[in-house]
Amino acid sequence: MVAGSITLSVIKADIGGYVGHCSVHSALVARARQFLAEHGADLLTDWSVLTVGDDLVLVMTHRNGEDNPSIHQLAWDLFVACTEVACSLKLYGAGQDLLADAFSGNIKGLGPGVAEMEFVERLSEPVVILAADKTDPGAWNLPLYKMFADPFNTAGLVIDGKMHKGFRFEVHDLVANCRVFFDCPEELYDMLVFIGASSRYCIKSVHSRTLPEPGASSSTQKLNLMAGRYIGKDDPVCIVRCQNGLPAVGEVLEPFATPHLVAGWMRGSHSGPLMPVGFCDATPTRFDGPPRVIAAGYQLAGGRLGGPHDFFADKSFDRARQRALEVADYMRQMGPFEPHRLPLDAMEYTTLPDVAKRLKDRFEPIRQTRW
């Protein structure tokens, strides 16, 4: 822990959809807020509860550092308590993100998505919390690349001297369970080799190379890899600090003005546009989608969360939403064909292998004909 630092922990879980996979029942939100008020007073400086699609998102500030067992225990116990409510309401997929029967010291690897960041508050500390539904952690690769490495998106890379040396990216290989660091802009092309394959390689964090400042942190948990079977998409979260040597708020939001294709959507098996929406529209229904992303702005002051401000409710994102709908129309016309349906290697942990297994004995060798 750094003296005088604050830790921002964002932990999300799907503990039951209302109705189907559309949204979070108000009783779950109420239970989460009640639980934090009753059990978080001695641990937390402040907290906020968000929802996106069928996911409950906890935004918490505290002085305990990253990966703190007490903070993770608090979140786990909250999700268990909310799962009891979900079960009583017979909500779909109640507790599906809780992959263990008991907490084991760290919530990572147990199902919920986790993004954390420890830092010393600056004179002004604006933070954007991104939360997505019906997609996976690879959804952040393109936006984070644009925010921290693309001068066509982020003017500060050109005109702000504190950003000229660029940023260090931490990239995780989710299959081999290892990581690599890239210093950009020098190693930008090398990094793109990997982060362009977003189904396997995901940007975990970004740090300034000029200042001792973390810029971004994301969740990289993949439920299907952890469980060895399909139990829903991962619905990632991401923390991005803004201004003063880091991207401005508008530069953080700008990548979402052009909706990009992400994996997820229906049954976690399709590609679709990531649609930026206000809080009230984060309720995916068409083919259980299209995938949604919200942006919650907070102004931190002494660890207190001033907000949230609903960034994507801004009318300037109306055209992005319209384009996302047009892309959704186009992709849906392909039905079960790639590239709308994910390639087979990305379907390994869905229900598709069970279907293929029943048909494997019907395949026979092709005899070669010589002319």
Image (tube, rainbow, N blue to C red):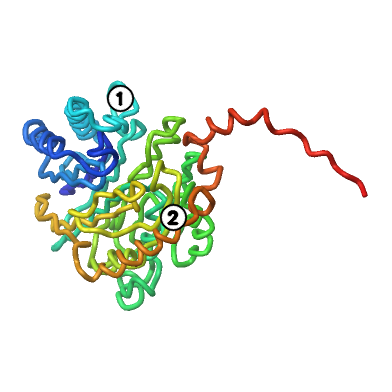
What residue did someone put label 2 on?
Answer: 332
Q: Among all residues in the image, which is located at the extreme top?
A: 101
Mark number, residue 199: none
Residue 92, given in percent of the width and then of the height, sits at 28, 33
Q: Residue at x 6, y 31 (%)?
A: 38
Disc 2 is placed on an element classified as helix
Report x, y in % for residue 177.
47, 39
Q: Is residue 148 visible?
A: no
Q: CA distance from mark 2 to mark 1?
A: 42 Å
Q: Quadrant of residue 32?
A: top left
Lateral position of residue 219 relative to residue 337, left or right: left
Badge 1 element: loop
> Total number of numbered labels?
2
> At 30% across and 21% down in the image, what residue appears?
101
Task: Check disc 2: other Cα within 10 Å, few if <14, some if 14-19, many if 20+.
Answer: some
Q: Amino acid at mark 2?
A: Arg
Query: Residue 105: x percent and y percent?
Result: 28, 27
Q: Is residue 10 above or below residue 72?
A: below
Q: Residue furthest bottom?
A: 159
Residue bearing the label numbered 1: 104
Picture quarter with the N terminus:
top left
**For residue 28, side relative to residue 168 (left or right):** left
Mark 2 or mark 1, which has the lower sequence index? Answer: 1
Q: Residues within 10 Å of mark 1 (few under 14, many from 20)?
A: some
Question: Which callout, 2 or 1, points to the residue nearer the camera?
Answer: 2
Q: Residue furthest right?
A: 371
Q: Which is more toward the observer, 305 or 264?
A: 264
- Residue kind at label 1, given as amino acid type: Ser
